[in-house]
Amino acid sequence: MKTHTSYLTFTTKKRQEIIDITDDVESCRAAAGITEGFVLVSAMHISASVFVNDHEPGLWKDILDWLETRVAPWSPDDYRHNSGTGEDNAAAHLRSLTIGHEVMVPVTKGRLDFGPWQRVFYGEWDGQRAKRVIIKAMGD
């Protein structure tokens, strides 16, 4: 079995951002030289996410609005985590839990095996400091 591991580091300018990392996932697959297998992509922080969805800015806005209005509004005084730790990012933890922190992308015949509009995204929910993503390609 062949493997290759890559790391990405993000320091976002905004507290919340969605970043397309599909090309980085493909670069890791190519570096491993695999034609059949998987690529694991995982956020290494509990206030960030990795997910697969459509590369469409209107959808990104919908996701951010959904997280803010229905999942975990950014209202620091409403969360016990914030009063117990002195942090203000409980909403980011809940957003990560909702969206998820990792994906497995299948590799078939030397290509990331996606549906027609699927891409891999990094979701930052508590930005403005360095955070990492691990990408690990495995296969033959």
Image (cartoon, helix red, strand yellow):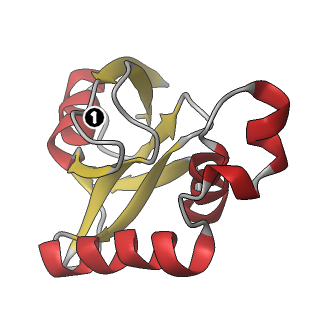
Task: Please state if 99 lies on the left or on the right of 127 as rendered.
Answer: right
32 is higher (above) or lower (below) than 75:
above
- Where residue 56 sits, quadrant-wise, is bottom left
Residue 110 visible in the snapshot: no
Residue at left 26%, top 71%?
Answer: 60
Q: Which residue is mark 1?
A: 29
**Amino acid marked by disc 1:** Arg
Residue at left 50%, top 78%?
Answer: 69
Q: Residue furthest front?
A: 77
Percent position of residue 20, x then y: 20, 51
Percent position of residue 97, x then y: 67, 56
98 is higher (above) or lower (below) than 50:
below
Percent position of residue 72, x then y: 61, 66
111 is higher (above) or lower (below) than 47:
below
Task: Please state if 115 lies on the left or on the right of 78 as rendered.
Answer: left
- Nearer to me, 136 or 11: 11
Residue at left 31%, top 23%?
Answer: 8
Residue 33 visible in the snapshot: yes
